[in-house]
Image: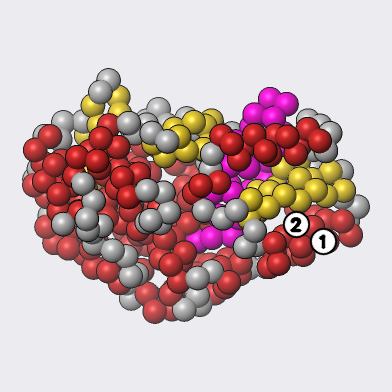
Amino acid sequence: MHPVATGEDVLHKLPELLAEFGLGGRAFIITDEHLLPIYAGPVRESLERSGWKVGLYAVPPGEESKSLERAATLWDWLASERAERRHVVIALGGGVVGDLAGWVAATYLRGLPLVQVPTTLLAQVDSSIGGKTGVNHRSAKNLIGSFYPPVVAIIDPALLRTLPERELRCGWAEVVKTALIADPALFEFLLPHRDELRALDQAALAHVVGRCAEIKLQVVTEDPTEQGRRAILNYGHTLGHGIENAAGYGALTHGEAIAIGMRAAARIAVELGLLDPAVAARQNEALDGFGLPASAPGLSVDAVLAAMRLDKKVHSGTLRWVLLEGVGRPVVRSDVPEDLVRLAAAECVA
């Protein structure tokens, strides 16, 4: 799997890092319109000072940009710029930009070198690592895509200082998820240091972001194409993606939907006798502590269940659930009764 470069202000070393990986010449930065005045310009200037020829394209922010139509505009742009196979695509942004730019890089000329530079907490701890790329379909989130690892993911926690609170909350959901599935010590660190983390204390943040990135990289290195252990990364995602889809992309952030999905998964695990209710309560306390929602009121249970059945985690018509037997002890189950699924979904939209 690909390397990850982490550290405060590591973005300032971007030209040197790219040179270390044998990259040079021409780069195409794909970003979003919000980041143009904040990071995209300085990154472009830094590369140009080091001799790069740089193109820059900004897409509108939000899940609506993760579409076949937007990918087609980017293919058109690369074609008009005469992009070649040795040229580099730099995904500078959050998960939407990373997934979209990654898929464009994977498919144009059958693959251009890709560098992920995540600017959101969610992307830094999760989506920029592991090579999943893709776009949404009207039927389901991330239905069209590929596994296409970047040459390197460059993760700089200092970039999080400009994030709005809601975007940070979105990332905290994935941080809590990562701790729950893989690292009891990290989970025990989160609540006592909640105030420091939410205030973006750089020492605490660097510890958490670095550890989450390390965990994600370990898991995806063992299972690059999600044939086995990588499935544990979908904790909270089975019902969470259904809620996100049923609500309409953009109504809830990915992290908000996944937080609700984790609460549902814990409820199911308790009902099946897998999980101590006290552990479920501690999970929910952690989610509460980072300002994450407990439900998405007003959604149709049937719409949520229909969206879940279209998800990529369906095998032979059966949903796979990642559940917990304890912190750091995930299991994958395909035998969750339909009535229990409906009960959990109903609680999530009440």
Residue at the spot 54% in from the left edge and 74% down from the top edge: 202
Residue 296 drawn above or below residue 228: below
In percent of width and height, residue 302 lies at 19, 40
Give the residue type at disc 1. Answer: Ser
Give the residue type at disc 2. Answer: Leu
Residue 55 is left or right of residue 180, and the answer is: right
Q: Which residue is mark 1?
A: 46
- What segment carries the magenta color? 93-121
Q: Is residue 338 magenta?
A: no
Evaluate if marks 2 and 1 touch, with contact meaning CB atoms under 8 Å apart.
yes
Residue at the spot 76% in from the left edge and 62% down from the top edge: 41
Residue 322 is left or right of residue 139, and the answer is: left
Q: Which residue is mark 2?
A: 14
- Is residue 217 at all visible to an observer of this figure? yes
Q: Is residue 98 magenta?
A: yes
In percent of width and height, residue 147 lies at 54, 32
Give the quadrant of the C terminus: bottom left
Secondary element at image label 1:
helix
Q: Mark 1 packing: few (<14 Cα in 10 Å), some, or many (20+)? A: some
Residue 161 is left or right of residue 15, and the answer is: left
Question: Is residue 98 or residue 57 the one in the foreground?
Answer: 57
Residue at the spot 48% in from the left edge and 56% down from the top edge: 122
Residue 335 drawn above or below residue 70: above
Question: Is residue 333 or residue 302 the one in the foreground?
Answer: 302
